Image: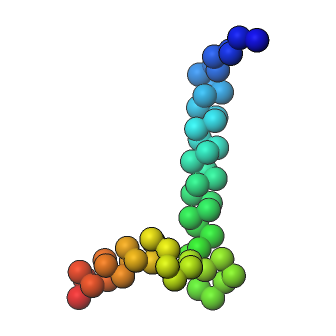
Amino acid sequence: MAVTRLKRKDRRNKTVSRLEVQFLKNATNIENGSRSQEPKHSQVVKNNAVLASFSK
């Protein structure tokens, strides 16, 4: 079966929904003390520590 090309609006919906999911995944880690807290070895935590050291 041939692969059909998505119409423009469907291609857009695909990328928008993918980005939306990515945004929501990132947003869930913002709350303090929640079960979705960043693991202490994650890259985000390391980046934040480096940024904090620069701002002093």
| Residue 17 shown left or right of residue 53 in the figure | right
Taking the view exactly as shown, the residue that stands out farthest to the top is 2
Q: Quadrant of residue 34?
A: bottom right
Snapshot quadrant of residue 14: top right
Residue at 61% from the left image edge and 50% from the top image edge = 20
Residue 31, image x and y in percent? Answer: 60, 80
Residue 50 located left or right of residue 8: left
Judged left or right of residue 41, residue 3 is right
Q: Quadrant of residue 18?
A: top right
Residue 39 sits above or below residue 33 on the image:
above
Residue 29 image point, x, y percent:
59, 74
Residue 49 seen in the figure: yes
Can the viewer see residue 31? no
Coloration of the structure image: rainbow
Q: Residue 35's spot in the image, x, y percent?
A: 69, 82
Q: Residue at x 23, y 80 (%)?
A: 54
- For the point 65% across and 27% down, the residue is 10
